[in-house]
Amino acid sequence: MKYYFLTEDSEKCLAPFFSKMVLTASFISVVIISIILLIFWPRQPLADFITVNKIPLAFFLIFAATLIIYSYVNLCCGSGDMIQRGYHIIKYRTDRSTFEKEIDFFRYGLIEFLLHTLILLLPFLPLLILAASISAVSLITFVQAVFILYTASLLCRMFGFMVYLFWGRLSTIGYFTARAFMIIFIFGTFIFAPYINPLQFLYLLNESPDAMGLPFVLYMAIVMFATLLLILTNHTLVRRHMNQEKTT
Amino acid sequence: MLLKSRNLMRQSHSNRSKVIIFAAALMVIFIPLPALSAAFSLDYALGLGGHFQLNTWTPLTVVLENRGRPTRGTLEVIVTSGSEYHQDVHQSTYAMDVDLPHNSKKRYAFAVMIKSFTHELIIRLKQNDTVIISKSINLRPHFTEKSFAVVADNFVSPDILSVLPKALYPVNVRPKFLPETWYGYDSVKLLIMRAAALKELRERQFQALTQWIKQGGYLVTTGGLNYGSLLEKRIQHILPINVFGHKRFFELKSLAQFCSQTLISEEPFLVLNVRIDNSNVLVKEKDIPLIFQKNLGFGQIFFLSFDYNTPPFSRWEGRKFFWDKILSMRPLIGDQGIVLENQKILDSMLAKIPVHFPGLKSGFIFIGMYLVFLRYFLKKIREPGKRRWENGFFLLLVITAFTTVGYWRFFYPNNKQKFTYNSFCQLDLSGLNTPASAKCILGLYALKKTAYRVDFGSFSYPVTHVLSKRLKKKIPNPYVLHENYNGLQIAGSLEEWSHSFYMIKSTFDSPLEGHALRDPHHLTIKVENKLPHKIVDCLIYFKKRFLVIDDIPANKQQTIKLKLSELKKTEIFNDHEAEQIINRFDNNGALSYLRTTSEIVFFLLGGFKRV
């Protein structure tokens, strides 16, 4: 099996790891988070927070900002917005089949998505650890929060890919459906399903990290289950596409 | 049919046996609980003669009897303070480890601070988390707003309480219920007890009494006819008395000098002829001293050569005047030192918490450098070819390096310092060879939920919490004052990003000693620091002047020699200067004090333990 996403930057790859677009998006994301971190860096002494029994929110704010940006980048990668604009795309303005559609999902797309989501998270780590040090959260809480970022972004990526498989890369419905999902998952769940709202969870981790054992397991279970469903759906859709290709 | 009925019978048999087994199991589960509590009985003696003064430390004696199996547990006294209206209802728990063998009866003495009579006081015996026996006390009938005049004796003349000064609340207390800590006498202004009653005291009670007198307490005692108790070693230690027998009198006219009333009796009565070392004789009758005054620390002991509990004194009409006069001679201890508001001290301590946020400057440099490296390698990695993998590896290396640096430079130090403390101690010395009165505040700070234990060693201190006015929350973080075989401990817990302050007011042996020597031209001042810690910015107050003596190292002395002509030129200390000194605690000047005194308090208290 050849992993084209590692070696090719062509328009046949949905989100090639080393493409200019993906790397630029990744760098801009890190710059944005750096600016936010410097803006929210506490100007008051630590004693002022202890005096009034207030917990600095730097951890929550930085992780929340990272969650939104990182999930969005992954959503775009999944839905084909990060595709390399090659000759075909510029000339014909039509979709071209990608390797992700043509190769079995379990053997290609899933591995790519798991790996790429992880790689995209790595550049944020030094900034995240800085934010965690300001709020003085424990290493376990930090790891929990990083898991939340990873799983939430993976879910967004899987959904983005499902939208791409359904409507293609250029569909307006697909464009809005993918973003609507992200808004509902990151913000909307706060109203109707707060226990799976990643923002609320990050806030709680900032406020009382010790009380997060069971809610964390519940959150992870629900999000992983949703991701699993999307994986199966994507697999089915890729299979169908492969069969259609064979018959034509 | 027969088979069916047999089956039915067998079934009913098996059902019945199931019911019996179930009932037996229930009995096994439920019987031990009441049986366990039935084996214990709990009795108590609250306050002094059943009364206590609000906002003072009050003795509480709990007697536990165990007629069942040997038990080890914790005896807890829960005092609830605050009001629902102010939303500051909170509980203070005083605990003691108990060990009750089979058929045993033990007495446990507490000193508790009661601030409100509206809530019940709870005494309970716990084994692990199970309450074995519990008793609630309605405090309303027990409280008084007056301080106490205590007559500690098993037998007293019936009307003695009625002639004691009206300004005080007179009570009779059996000696065995007297406090075992010096601050248990907090509400006592006058303690009257015969030497025989002193002899009855348990060692801890006697030590507590001695300590209380040294800290400003006031004891009036007498030998009575049987003066054997006076010769007991521990009594001799505080009252070095020599007895020369009895003397017979019909009247004590000299008492008129003392309280403007003469004691005349138709029957003859005996007066003890004694001498007490280092004491003042206040009243004498025919060269026989009647009333002695002996200083002990900040307090005083009055010794009466006659027995106040027997005739003719117990029937004397001048008794009321006599006790009024006695009370008027009580040692008065004012605030001699600089009075510092607690809030000012707390603010200074909070300003000097030994943990900090990572500096913005270092954060900025870190982020800037990271972005430069990241940008460089991301650009490099775009270029296709063999170098891409190499650059990819370097990029990973950069991310790993910055994450590691971020962890060790920023994350780890703050994570390590999740619980920290500092302290402030103000010592007031009133003269040579007198104890130093101290106000110590201990500040505990946590960035994460933490359980802690502060060990005070074997000596008991009156520990109270102090709340910062800057805090919205009006109740303290939960804590228990736990007394066990090792001594007193504060066991408590702190929430994330919170603090707790504890205050101890006590007296200590003075850690400083100063001597001044003057010759015709010079003044030599020598100050000795007996502390195991350095004193910084030491100033000496001498002849209404502050003289700078600089730092004094631990266990060392510092000597300065001044020309008298120069001394006269030194500005005399005035209110303005006093204000300047106080202001130093508000401004940065407080920092040097805090640095030094934190070590002093640590030394005095014994040590800390994080659990």
Image: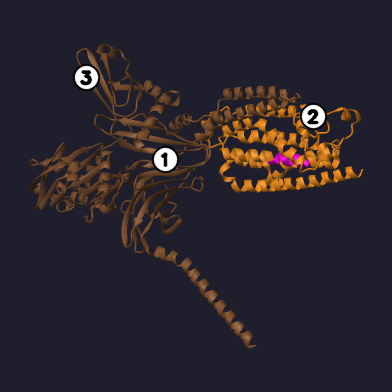
The relative height of residue A2 versus residue B525 in the rendered view (above or below) is below
Mark 3 highlights which residue? B517
Q: Earlier in the sequence, mark 1 or mark 3?
A: 3
Q: Which mark is residue B609?
A: 1
CA separation, marks 1 and 2? 60 Å
Query: Image point 24% across, 36% down: which residue?
Result: B297
Question: In the figure, the orange chain has which letter?
Answer: A
* SS at circle 2: loop
Observer-nearest of B262 and B121: B121
Subunit that carries the residue with mark 1: B
Q: Which residues are magenta?
A: A151-159
- Quadrant of the rendered image containing residue B43: bottom left
A138 inside magenta stretch: no
**Taking the image as drawn, is residue B102 in sight?**
yes
Query: Image point 50% across, 31% down: which residue?
Result: B355
Are the residues flagged by discs 1 and 3 from a single subunit? Answer: yes
Q: Position of residue B391 (x, y in %)?
A: 69, 25
Foreground disc of the pair 1, 2: 2
Question: In the figure, the brown chain has which letter?
Answer: B
Q: Counting other residues with Cα less than 10 Å from the Cα at mark 1, is it few (<14), some (14-19), or many (20 or more)?
A: few
Mark 2 highlights which residue? A9
- State yes or no: discs 1 and 3 in contact (Cβ < 8 Å): no
Observer-nearest of B354 and A237: A237
Q: Which residue type carries mark 2?
A: Asp
Are the residues flagged by discs 1 and 2 from a single subunit? Answer: no
Q: Which mark is residue B30?
A: none
Are the residues flagged by discs 3 and 2 from a single subunit? Answer: no
Q: Which residue type carries mark 3?
A: Leu
- State yes or no: discs 3 and 2 in contact (Cβ < 8 Å): no
Q: Counting other residues with Cα less than 10 Å from the Cα at mark 2, is it few (<14), some (14-19), or many (20 or more)?
A: many
Subunit that carries the residue with mark 3: B
